[in-house]
Amino acid sequence: MNFYITDDDVTVRSMLAQFIEDEDLGQVVGESDDGAFLNGETLNLKKVDILLIDLLMPTRDGLETIQSIKPTFKGKIIMISQIESKELISKAYTLGIENYIIKPINKIEVLAVIRKVMEHTRLEKSIQDIQKSLNTVLQMDTMLNKKEPSFKEYNIKNYGELLLTELGITGECGSKDLIEILAFLFNYEKKNTFEHGLPSLNEIYEYLANKKLGATADEGDLRREAKASKQRVRRTVYQSLNHLASLGLTDFSNAKFEKYSSQFFDFTMVRKKLTELKNESKPAFTSTRINIKKFIQALYFEAKRMMLE
């Protein structure tokens, strides 16, 4: 994502930029020391997704600036200020800010707020995409009656993408593999049911390899692709664990942490990851035994539940 920082304190701008870059949250595409230098059209041209803006500045403060740019600026706004006036904060939210950071800034709060806004942005986009898709579908009722299976598969993929956004892994390299796995399991259940449980992970990875390389690929290439898919999925699931644990570390009562951590992961694994993050110890990815099948099963049944509601 693209960030723009407006604050009259150069140290604050530098710290915010450093936090964003160190955590690979995106790139800072511009900075300014006063709101007078901002206008909505310029921010849109720079494709700014999130604007971080100080409340108090010499020429034009944050509230005045937001009033000026809000009619045209399409991104999200995070207000920053050392003033904790409920009246000012309430006015800022009324004007359309997404969240609020209190000075002096600290890394944990900044990252938590930014990630929350990023997740909200991605979720909105996913919902908009789903709405567009559903509008298209509603105009094709006759065709859908003839092709109901593909319509259902299309739905479970969309709800899967929404879930991956909730789990913080929509942009990971293995996210596409997980979406294809949902479609595979949906078709598998129609033909075979899950009376004897889900197909094995090896069967799933072999399916992904065949789908990607085609029936004419030789066995060696298929084995290598199946192994690559397995690694992509495992790394993506690990990133989801890391994401949920980060939410739990910041706020143990976080709704996503409470809902998804135990649903998608073993409690001992979540507790271990929380301890790693709390102690800022180096994550031992290679020694972490994540139950991939539990994750895939939870992802499928949650996506299917959402689809049937």
Image: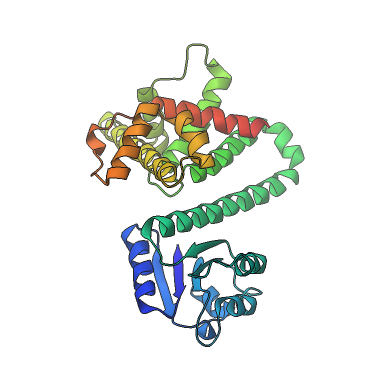
Horizontal arrangement in the rendering, residue 246 relative to residue 75 (left or right): left
Q: Is residue 226 above or below residue 174?
A: above
Q: Is residue 295 above or below residue 198?
A: below
Front-lying residue, 155 or 159: 159
The residue lying at 50 percent from left, 82 percent from top is: 57
Number of numbered callouts drawn: 0
Horizontal arrangement in the rendering, residue 264 relative to residue 140 (left or right): left
- Measured as percent of width and height from the top left, residue 112 is found at 44, 54
The residue lying at 73 percent from left, 33 percent from top is: 145
- Measured as percent of width and height from the top left, residue 236 is found at 37, 41
Residue farthest along the bottom direction in this orientation: 59
The residue lying at 58 percent from left, 54 percent from top is: 125
Horizontal arrangement in the rendering, residue 53 relative to residue 16 (left or right): right
- Measured as percent of width and height from the top left, residue 63 is found at 60, 76
The residue lying at 55 percent from left, 16 percent from top is: 193
Question: For the C terminus, which image quadrant?
Answer: top right
State the image quarter where residue 224 is shown: top left
Front-lying residue, 160 or 62: 62
- Measured as percent of width and height from the top left, residue 241 is found at 39, 38
